[in-house]
């Protein structure tokens, strides 16, 4: 059962922390791939200069829309990045899903990525994650509460430490500690 819409209708920082341990599920051409979310980054509204709400006008419709929808964009013209829109209509924010611990469909993920199925890099990093799950810009706007791309509640108790720090790979608003990860998890990106 996917997370309900109300889960996403909160500030991006809270959603980013609470997504840790939840399970991202992608259903594509009869195959199911899934992974436990182990790393996220929150992006706020225009006050956050690293947020697309601040400098990417085309993203504003989704950013200011209702929480619980996917925002997928092409980064550097080659890597898709998956974000979950957070907040209520009119209040911008999103959460970048940075890394997963694979729980289902490892063979399909490994085939798509071209790495061994037991590799900790299988779905570590935003581009690797989307490639492993077969997520593309066609998933932009997908309803994360129903359909082929969903996020489900944790499949095991959340008995882990949440670490936080600056976001990765940005040049604006670098001092904000809006990156969250499961402390000690081997699937967290190494940056």
Image (cartoon, rainbow, N blue to C red):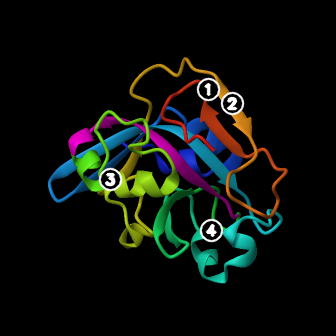
Q: Which dot marks residue 163?
A: 2
The 10 Å Cα crowd at callout 3, few under 14, some 14 to 19, many 20 or more, is many
Asked if one can make out residue 15 in the rendered structure from this viewpoint, the answer is yes
Mark 1 lies on residue: 183
Q: In this view of the protein, which residue sits in the foreground, 19 or 66? A: 19
Q: Which dot marks residue 113?
A: 3
- Residue 82, position as x, y percentages in the image: 49, 59
Q: Which dot marks residue 146?
A: none
Q: Residue at x 51, y 49 (%)?
A: 125
Q: Residue at x 57, y 63 (%)?
A: 66
Pointer 1 with pointer 2, Cβ within 8 A: yes
Q: CA distance from mark 1 to mark 3?
A: 25 Å
Outermost residue on the bottom side: it is: 57
- Residue 147, position as x, y percentages in the image: 31, 57
The 10 Å Cα crowd at callout 2, few under 14, some 14 to 19, many 20 or more, is few
Mark 4 lies on residue: 63
Q: Which residues are magenta?
A: 92-107
Q: Earlier in the sequence, mark 3 or mark 4?
A: 4
Q: Nearer the viewer, mark 1 or mark 4?
A: 1
Q: Secondary structure at mark 1?
A: loop
Q: Nearer the viewer, mark 4 or mark 2?
A: 2
Q: Residue at x 45, y 69 (%)?
A: 141
Q: Residue at x 29, y 52 (%)?
A: 114
């Amino acid at each position: 059962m996917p997370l309900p819409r109300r889960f996403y209708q909160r500030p991006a920082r809270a959603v980013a922390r609470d997504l840790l341990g939840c399970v991202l599920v992608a259903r594509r051409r009869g195959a199911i791939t899934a992974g436990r979310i182990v790393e996220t980054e929150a992006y706020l509204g225009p006050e956050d200069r690293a947020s697309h709400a601040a400098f990417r006008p085309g993203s504003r419709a989704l950013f200011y829309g209702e929480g619980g929808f996917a925002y997928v964009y092409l980064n550097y013209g080659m890597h898709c990045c998956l974000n979950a829109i957070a907040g209520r209509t009119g209040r911008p924010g999103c959460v970048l899903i940075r890394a997963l611990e694979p729980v289902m469909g490892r063979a399909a993920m490994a085939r798509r990525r071209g790495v061994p199925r037991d590799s900790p890099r299988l779905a570590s990093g935003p581009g690797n994650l989307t490639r492993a799950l077969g997520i593309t810009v066609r998933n932009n706007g997908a309803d994360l509460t129903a359909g082929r791309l969903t996020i489900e509640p944790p499949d095991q108790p959340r008995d882990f430490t949440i670490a936080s720090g600056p976001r990765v790979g940005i040049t604006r608003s670098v001092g904000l500690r809006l990156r969250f990860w499961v402390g000690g998890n081997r699937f967290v990106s190494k940056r």
